[in-house]
Amino acid sequence: MAVEVIAGRRMGVRYAGIGEPAVLLHCSLAHSGAWGGVMTGLADRLSMLAVDLPGHGETEFDPASDGQTQACETTIALLERMDRPVHLIGHSFGATVAIRIAVARPGLVASLSLYEPVYFSLLAEGNPEAHARERADASQFLTHLVAGDMHTAAVLFLELWGGPGGFKSMSKPQQDYILKTIPHILDNSRSVMEGHQGSVDLSKVANIKAPFLLMEGGLSPEPIRMLNDLIVATLPTVQRHVFETAAHMGPISHAPDVTRVVRAFLFGDET
């Protein structure tokens, strides 16, 4: 683990592996260490850099800007240091950052391997009913965030996205970290739920040229499937893979399976 200043921001980064360059972007409430299992499985194929997103791990957050914009700026600064296009591997909110970068700076991106990008603003355009459902589900924990009740917000958020046991099954240090970072869910939700300056729409997704692997868990919330249906319909060249026994936290809970599918996508390795 290292701490570097990138695009003027203090940022936590982890390096691993040899081979073609890749940058890994984690989900909300996690940190770069969440990629440990995947990085181990790809270390002989990729020279990887996993980053702590703004407000997570060792990366600072600037309240003057939204978290997705900050994540894009710092990740682009990292990509610009590379001598060739880079494979982007993203999970959930981190995957939305990867999509936005692929749209804004396509020349920097060699491929996209994304697990459940939660870019729900795309549903507002392509499936308004599903978008309304997701807004209703999110309101259950966002209401508590706005009221400052971080504990209840954390319990509800992790019941929806974190898998069995959720917040109550975590150790005290893990719970403390969740309570520290969960205020960023409010900011991140605005970035991915509503259109805003710099956000992505379906016409921009349709123009992505980089090879695109779209992954999801068979046990994930239904809006994920609806969103991925929409992305595939918009960009038919996308390769899609469903991990039937996984949910939203597949890159952690099913890291070897995710690794095998990414290896097959990028290099044709047998799964």
Image (cartoon, rainbow, N blue to C red):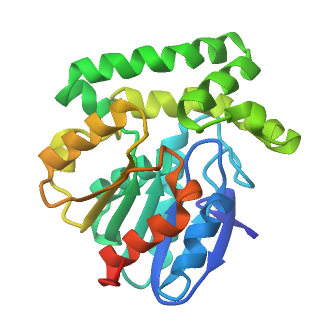
Q: Is residue 97 left or right of residue 128?
A: right
State the image coordinates of residue 6 (x, y, percent, origin top left).
62, 64
Query: Going 60% across and 51% down the picture, which residue do you hit?
Result: 53
Q: In this view, does 27 lie to the left or right of 34?
A: left
Query: Going 41% across and 34% down the picture, which residue do you hit?
Result: 192
State the image coordinates of residue 193 (x, y, percent, origin top left).
39, 28
Query: Going 64% across and 77% down the picture, which residue do you hit?
Result: 15
Q: Which quarter of the rendered picture does the C terminus lie within?
A: bottom left
Q: Examine the rendered structure and indicate whether residue 10 appears above or below residue 200.
A: below
Q: Examine the rendered structure and indicate whether residue 42 appears above or below residue 77.
A: below
The total of numbered circles placed on residues is 0
Question: Quick one: which residue is furthest to the right in this view?
Answer: 172
Q: Can residue 197 be seen in this view?
A: no
State the image coordinates of residue 106 (x, y, percent, origin top left).
28, 64
State the image coordinates of residue 130 (x, y, percent, origin top left).
28, 23
Q: Which quarter of the rendered picture does the N terminus lie within?
A: bottom right
Q: Is residue 24 left or right of residue 152?
A: left
Q: Examine the rendered structure and indicate whether residue 22 appears above or below residue 194.
A: below
Query: Going 60% across and 34% down the picture, which residue do you hit?
Result: 64
Q: Is residue 60 visible?
A: yes
Q: Is residue 130 left or right of residue 149?
A: left
